[in-house]
Image (spheres, helix red, strand yellow):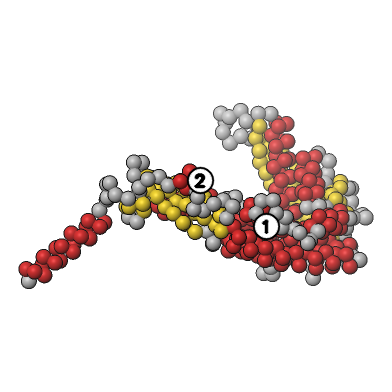
Amino acid sequence: MTRNLSIICLSALLCACAGARVKNGSVQGGVPSGPRPDWTDGTSAEFPRNRFLTGVGIADDQASAMERARGEISRVFSTQVTVNSMATATEQTTERQGTSSTASSQDIMQTVRSTSQKVLEGVEIARSWREAAAGRYYSLAVLDRAKALAAMGDKMEELDGQAKDLQARLTATPEKLDKVKYALRLRSLMQARESLAADMRVLAPGERPDAGFDATAASDAAAKSLGQLDVAVIIPDGASGVRSAIISALNAIGLDGREAKGPEGADIAVDCSAQFEQVADPDPRSAWKWARGAASVSMKDVKTSKIFLNFDASAKEASAEESGARARAEVSLGKKIAAEISRGINSYFEAQP
């Protein structure tokens, strides 16, 4: 009994020693804390930059240091941010239109995002180190350039095949609205492709991932077809800021928006009524001047007389002068309207068979 008790006590003592802080040793909790490794300064002989993309994370705990190290690698890629934002905009449009179908541009963006996420899953925490004096943790994340480039290359080939098919359909169809449908899809695909190409250039600087495919010709073909769609912007006088924002939004997606008195001769008509008023400051002690703008907007396919988008928007802004408040309200309201119009046009043409 005494012998067994001694064994138990000895085992407990050994475990306590194993888990205790080692003041002069090289490891604490599995993390080395000896001499400072070269990789903590951003370069590593073990993981040369020509073969690996690396990121160093520093934090007060190991888990945060590892997360930051991975983040250092992911932030150099453009696809994550670009694709996430574009896919979100498409999803919001789909919900507002009351359909459960998935738009092709969303498909494109989501597949590229999946490729990017798959590549980033290849990021490994290769080394960790603890700076004993300051109590900080360092982690080194590495990504094998060749493996990541191969995964992105496969997706690039797939996107190129889709782009060639869309470009062929765009060329073959004689109908203007069908051309716009294919042009918008091709434009979305080319934007996703450019994000992917930018990420490939991060992995292989100096190489041209678009060899074998004329991306410029595809983009030009899409732009030409979009430019042929006549969009009339009908808005009363006195709302120049709103009018400018709408036309700028149309131009941003490649469409030729023009001010008009009516829908005659146009393919798409944007009809906007806007009113502005001065409003009292809720704080009686304030010297700010406030203005509110409200608008009702509809978009119509002139040929079929189908109204495919109808919404209201409002904005309230302040300035030291009444004229300044009015101008700011116009700009703010115009931006809201422009965002809805951009999404509405994309959603309408994406839904075309």
Residue 78 seen in the current view: no
Residue 192 % position (x, y): 70, 58
| Front of the two marks 1 and 2 | 2
User: Label 2 sits on what residue type?
Assistant: Gly
User: Is residue 206 rendered to the left or right of residue 260?
Assistant: left
The one of 227 and 304 positioned closer to us in this rendering: 227
In this view of the protein, can residue 282 be seen by the observer?
A: yes
Q: Which mark is residue 209?
A: none
How far apart are the two marked residues, 1 and 2, measured between alpha carbons? 25 Å
Residue in the image at 74% along x and 60% along y? 189
Q: Which mark is residue 196?
A: 1
**At which x and y percent is residue 147?**
59, 62
Do the residues under discs 1 and 2 have CB atoms within 8 angstroms?
A: no
Residue drawn at point x = 8 percent, y = 69 percent: 3
User: Label 2 belongs to which residue?
Assistant: 42
Q: Which quarter of the figure has residue 153?
A: bottom right
- How many numbered tags mark residues here? 2
115 or 252, which lies in front? 115
For this rendering, which residue is in front, 45 or 128? 45
Image location of residue 95, percent across then percent down: 66, 63
Q: Which of marks 1 and 2 is nearer the N terminus?
A: 2
Q: Which amino acid lies under the numbered mark 1 shown in the image of this protein?
A: Leu
Q: Is residue 101 above or below residue 138?
A: below
